[in-house]
Amino acid sequence: MLFAFFVKASAGLTFITLAFIILYIVINGAPHLSPSLFALNYTTENVSLFPSLVTTVITVLASLAIAVPFGVFTAIYLVEYAGSGNKLVRLIGVTAETLSGIPSIVYGLFGMIFFVTYLGWGFSVLAGAFTLSIMILPLIMRSAEESIKAVPATYREGSFGLGAGRLRTVFLIVLPAAAPGILAGVILAIGRIVGETAALIYTAGTVPKIPGDAFASARTLAVHMYALSSEGLYTGQAYATAVVLLVLVVGINALSAFAARKIIKIN
């Protein structure tokens, strides 16, 4: 009974905290939402968030395009090919756990030194996307690995019994069955990308414009919100940006959950 009480109390406290944060952001930000905040170009009069919204979507798609294939293919190798007793598997596991605990600002400093300075990309969306892809890679790899491990061995045995090879079994049987779990890891990665500021300030910069190309500097919604709040002149607009950021995250999570349900029905 005591254990059940603590579980329910923890769940209730989590729900209350989440509700308080959402209500606080909405109450302070919703009154400041206006058409000028969604103007095509940013000026000091309208402090438009639209360029940052576009940059956020571009950054999310670019980071996932880099990190998801590497993370999923690494997980496939670790589970399906390397074997559990392999020393390389243990080494990669320790490395992934270590990378997961590194503060984001350290990733930002690395990205600035390597991508911005050494490779000569400058403050750009490309440098920010590569830095974020390194940051979310352990999360995607770990979630994909656990999801693939959770697929019953009978699925593989049945596929092998019908004459399918390992590669065909992995891509046609194992991955579709593990897709909901992999997608859950991708959702968490998207949340980290959308909310990131420190790593992007050092790599993508803070220019409030829609990037013309991959080597242009730009700011995401989180960086935009940080810039407005730090100036102290646009606190209301910063809260309004937080509302848009919250809606964006909820929308992405809802879309991903819908996709996961469709995948489960297909399987």
Image (tube, grey):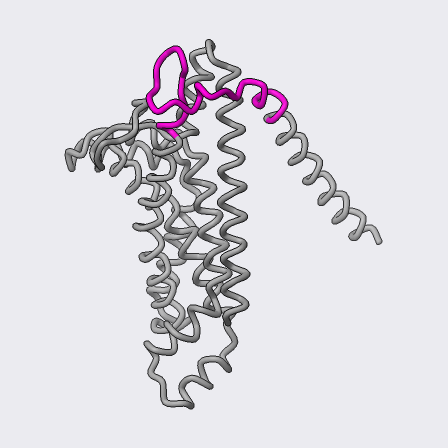
x then y, percent, for residue 140: 42, 53
Displayed quadrant of residue 122: top left
Residue 223's place in the image compared with 73, above or below, is: above
Residue 142's place in the image compared with 98, above or below, is: below
- Which one is nearer the viewer's eye here, 34 or 206? 34
Q: Which residues make up the magenta segment?
A: 26-52
x then y, percent, for residue 32: 54, 18
Query: In the image, 241: left or right of 31?
Result: left
Query: In the image, 105: left or right of 217?
Result: right
Q: Residue furthest right?
A: 1
Q: Look at 21% across and 35% down and name the residue there.
A: 213
Q: Residue furthest front?
A: 35
Q: Look at 36% across and 57% down and name the residue there.
A: 71
x then y, percent, for residue 259: 49, 57
Query: In the image, 81: left or right of 124?
Result: right
x then y, percent, for residue 184: 50, 54
Residue 27 within the magenta-colored segment of the rendering: yes
Q: Look at 40% across and 21% down and name the residue there.
A: 48
Q: How many marks?
A: 0
Where does the N terminus fall, quadrant-wise?
A: bottom right
- Which one is nearer the viewer's eye here, 114 or 196? 196
Query: In the image, 228: left or right of 11?
Result: left
Residue 22's place in the image compared with 228, above or below, is: below
Residue 61 within the magenta-colored segment of the rendering: no
Q: Look at 36% across and 70% down and name the residue there.
A: 86
